[in-house]
Amino acid sequence: MKTDRRNFIGGVGAVIASASLPLFGKDDPSLFPKRGVVERLAIAYQHIHIGLPQPFSVLHISDTHLTAVYDDEPEYLVKFAKYRAKVFGGRQEEALRDSLAWAKMNVDYVIHTGDFIDFQTRANLDIVKKVFGEEKALAGSMGNHEFQRRIPDEKIDESSIAGLRKYGALSMKLLAETFPFDISLQSTVVNGVNFVTLNEVVGFVTENHVERFHAEVKKGLPIILCMHCPFFTAELSRASSKYWQFNRKFRHDNPGPMNSFQTNDPVTRDFIAYLKSEPLLKGILTGHMHLTACDRFSPTAMQYIVGGNFMFHGEEVLFT
Ligand SMILES: [Fe+2]
């Protein structure tokens, strides 16, 4: 039979109207208990060409959202952990363990770009110390969930930068003591590439970040910026609004800002404008959106967002 495009698609059933998709029963992990390490993970692949004498690769993961808690922690935390484990599937430690095992076999370094924990518990913070201490992950950045304190009746003003700064400040000491790297800005040079991880809490930067970033630029090395919240682009905003607002199809073309602080806060706005013209910036690795996507940020840098590690997602990035 002659295969033209139409009967090829029809023949393999590649295109199905989503409205006609069947619904399935509950997931039963016991049906597939012996999945191999590789099959358990959904690893995307990206390539950043810089012109390096020595190629190397990195596993970029984000948003593991650990919900561990000890029995002797306050009851409200134990209850909340149970609820949040259901939100994230309850297999986050398994996903993390498999991702790190995969990394040991297949790449040179690991970067985790935030929301490693879902909220602060002693059990979660102990895992942070164990993993970042023992695994010698190349780098990590804070996510907005690292700051989640879950203190009953604690009021958080999330509508202003001043409010969020105040809220973030409540956790800075604890997080700085727990994570074995500078949680504000960390520079790690690998094979001549400067990985700069930036803690921007929820999408804005401070004068101190900007000053420290300029000091990194002065080193004259190519820079890969690693942080939690992506910078706004129209395409990423469109993808984000699709993912986070259910029952919407791709019919609109009017994406709003993903994070109003990026446009309203002058320090952040100016920093983004400057970054777009910085030739040493070669790529941006982020998470936060829980889906894998990428889009051009500047003439020299693409922005890569990796899907949630709690869903066994990660991306290998090859640097050449
Ligand atoms: Fe997240």
Image (spheres, rainbow, N blue to C red):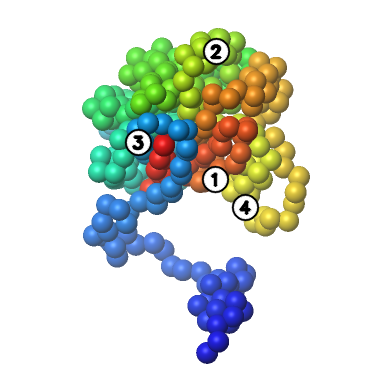
Counting residues from the N terminus, which is met first, the one under dot 4 or under dot 1? 4
Q: Which residue is mark 2?
A: 214
What whole-number distance in Å separates the C-alpha atoms at marks 3 and 1?
22 Å
Disc nearest the viewer among 4 and 1: 1
Local secondary structure at mark 4: loop
Q: Which residue is mark 3?
A: 56
Q: What amino acid is at disc 4? A: Phe
Q: Which residue is mark 4?
A: 246
Q: What amino acid is at disc 1? A: Ala
Find out whether the residues at labels 3 and 4 contact each other: C-beta distance under 8 Å: no
Q: Position of residue 147 (x, y in %)?
A: 47, 24
Disc nearest the viewer among 3 and 4: 3
Residue at 62%, 52% (x, y): give it: 246
The foreground one among 212 and 142 is: 212
Q: Quadrant of the C terminus?
A: top left
Find out whether the residues at labels 3 and 1 contact each other: C-beta distance under 8 Å: no
Q: Which residue is mark 1?
A: 293
Q: Quadrant of residue 300?
A: top right
What whole-number distance in Å separates the C-alpha atoms at marks 3 and 2?
26 Å
Residue at 72%, 22% (x, y): give it: 264
Residue 166 seen: no
Label 2 beta carbon less than 8 Å to ligand 1: no
